[in-house]
Image (spheres, helix red, strand yellow):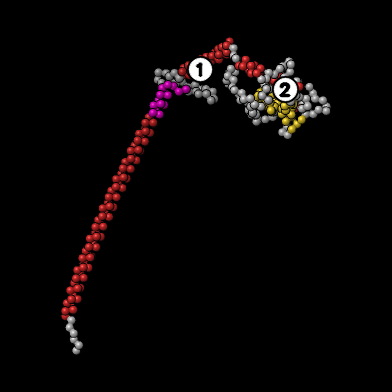
Amino acid sequence: MAPSGDQQAWVIPGGFTVLSLRFSEDEAHAALHQLCVKEHRIRSESNTHRPLERTLFVLNVPPYCTQDVLRHVFSRFGAIESVELCEKPGASESSDTSGYFRPAQTQCFRVAYIVFINASGVRSAKRHPHTLPLIVSCAERPVRTGVHKWIQQYSKSLVKASSLQQHIDQFMNEFDRRKEEEAELQKQEAEQQQEDEEGWVKVAKGSRGAKTRPHSERANQRTLQKEDRKRKRKELLNFYSWQHRNTQRERECVCVCVCVCVCVCLLNFYSWQHRNTQREHIAELRKKFEEDKQRIAVLRAQRKFRPF
């Protein structure tokens, strides 16, 4: 549906084109919702599911718009290959879980990546005028809301036992096939590891990056024994080192104790010698003092008055 000549697209800063969205043509749902769309051009993104020039990036997607609803609404611009809904822009999160385990979805406004089969679909969506709203719910494809929507979601959450059993059988068959391949590969490796009577293993030239000579069981045992000997030797060296350090600490402690005792003894000896020297000096001073007193007394007794 091409716009008329007097109708133009509404382009806002950022290169986004504004599209009007209306829930239904009923008068009770006359309110319009705006979607912001532009061509998805992130060259650094290595995602083959979002090819350049064919992917339309949509912002402000309301919660009632599912993938089927978006496919129906945007199919007027061209055939659609895939529709992807995300909570926020970014790389697609590929999940390896089964479709029976659905993660809880947050009821919020989301973003969408719509991939058209032809690049003309993106150009048509960008040229669509905002005065012509896109209708979400119509008589041919009604969109359920409220209680009816919850009932529909609950009905879809119920899984048929037959389809679940078929999926389980398919998974187990794939698992058994992988186990058989692993067992066959281990058997081939064991055959290559066979040694002759003298303990030799035939070495064959393999392709680049391939292991040409797998380790035999005996070689693995020798490697383990060598590692065990290294570990024991290291433990023994560590024990000797610890013992040597402990002996050095004990010697240092003994030397310190001896030095302290010698210092204490020397200090005591010097103190006793100093006190003894002081006593002898005081006794000598007292003896000299007594001798001086006697000499002075003798001089006084001999002194006579001689005027002439």
Q: Nearer the viewer, residue 40 or 276?
A: 276
Identify the disc placed on residue 170: none
Identify the residue shown where x is 31% and y is 47%.
256
Dot 1: few (<14), some (14–19), or many (≥20) neighbours within 10 Å?
few
Q: Quadrant of the C terminus?
A: bottom left
Q: Is residue 308 above or below residue 13?
A: below
Image coords of residue 3 (percent x, y) = 80, 25
SS at circle 2:
loop
Task: Please name the residue that numbered disc 1 is placed on.
Answer: 182
Image: magenta residue range: 214-228
Q: Nearer the viewer, residue 237 or 264?
A: 264
Q: Is residue 87 above or below residue 168?
A: below
Task: Please name the residue that numbered disc 2 is placed on.
Answer: 23
What is the spatial separation of the Cα atoms under label 2 and label 1, in whole angstroms?
A: 55 Å
Identify the residue shown where x is 71% and y is 17%.
142
Q: Is residue 265 left or right of residue 68?
A: left
Give, as a three-letter code, the residue at label 1.
Answer: Glu
Q: Is residue 162 above or below residue 66?
A: above
Q: Is residue 60 magenta?
A: no
Identify the residue shown where x is 33% and y is 43%.
249
Residue located farthest toward the front when viewing the structure as drawn: 28
- Sequence order check: which comes first, mark 2 or mark 1? 2
Q: Is residue 103 left or right of residue 226?
A: right
Identify the residue shown where x is 46% and y is 18%.
190
Residue 203 appears anywhere in the view: yes
| Magenta span: chief secondary structure | helix
Give, as a three-letter code, the residue at label 2.
Answer: Phe
